[in-house]
Amino acid sequence: MDQKQPSKGYLIVASRTKEFYKMGINLIRSLKEFYPEAQVCFVTEKLFCDGNESIADHLFYCGDNHREKLWALSQTPFDITMYIDADCEIFHEDIKNAFDMLDGHDLMFTPLIEERAHYFKKGIWENGRLKLNGGVFVYDIRNPLVKDFMNDWNIYYKQQLLGIWWPDLKDGKPDYDKHPEHLRRWDQFTLWWLTNVNEKYKDIKLKIFSEDERWNWYSSFNEKENKSGKDIIIYHYSSHAYKGKY
């Protein structure tokens, strides 16, 4: 008997503003232009919906937290999911290859490499450095440890943002001498702690995208960042540079 193939799809989350909803719709349309068979789950606030969300194959409603994506990660209807930030756009048909690239790993991220450190200077501090970009990644939630990871990312980040949780405490309060307070607002700092410090996830199988610049090309990058010389797959806009074509 043939083994059942895992379901695969894309997760897009847009909360807080109608503008993010519009960005999410633009992203889905660009995705389906280059990969018409793509299955997409769109997570957004019900109050933003104007009918355009019907382009998605699955629709979930979320709250208005600015990191509703972290809640949505564990809610995915797919076995293997590619999460993409709403302020992105697909530029190439190779988007369909992302799932195969996971190749038996649990998680696959684009990196924050040292050569691009000037783009994320505040993500480098005396006792650490952000290494993974939370804007584009693939994960296999069939592994219960991966589902725990996504749930913990959400829980720890919300507590971190409120100042309830921090990797190091002093007299019961966050010790910002070891890890600067400005990191508190970043879910990528929570991601750093889960993948570099938390023993629970030491055995999780983590992979980095090959030709990573193609998979998460920021509008602030310059041409020399494209080491592969190949066409960009995912274009990641800065909010001031957003020019969605749909």
Image (cartoon, rainbow, N blue to C red):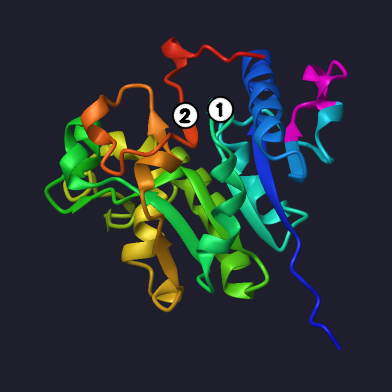
- Asked which quadrant contains residue 182, the reply is top left
Q: Secondary structure at mark 1?
A: strand
Residue drawn where x is 73% and y is 36% of the image: 43
Establish if 197 lies above or below 192: below
Magenta residues, as a range? Answer: 43-53
Q: Quadrant of the N terminus?
A: bottom right
In the rendered structure, does residue 100 fall within the stretch colored magenta?
Answer: no
Amino acid, disc 1: Glu
Q: Is residue 51 magenta?
A: yes
Q: Nearer the viewer, residue 91 or 16?
A: 91
Q: Quadrant of residue 210?
A: bottom left
Image coordinates for residue 5, horizontal then vertical, percent = 77, 71
Position of 204 relative to 160 (above/below): below
**Left or right: where does residue 183 sit relative to residue 128?**
right
Q: Note whether residue 155 is visible.
A: no
User: What amino acid type should be assigned to the residue bearing mark 2?
Assistant: Tyr
Instruction: Mark 1 and mark 2 in contact? Answer it, CB < 8 Å.
Output: yes
Can the viewer see residue 44 in this picture?
Answer: yes
Q: Position of residue 78 (x, y in %)?
A: 74, 57
Give the residue number, with chain letter if any, for mark 1. 89
Q: Relative to 135, does residue 75 appear above or below in the rendering?
A: below
State left or right for residue 214 relative to residue 93.
left
Where residue 225 appears, x then y in whole percent? 25, 34
Q: Residue at x 78, y 18 (%)?
A: 48
Are there few (<14), some (14-19), or many (20+) residues within 10 Å of tag 2? many
- Residue at screen point 71% across, 26% down: 29
Q: Earlier in the sequence, mark 1 or mark 2?
A: 1
User: In the orientation shown, which residue stands out farthest toward the left?
Assistant: 126
In the picture, the quarter occupied by the C terminus is: top right
| Left/right of residue 128 with respect to residue 244 in the rendered view | left
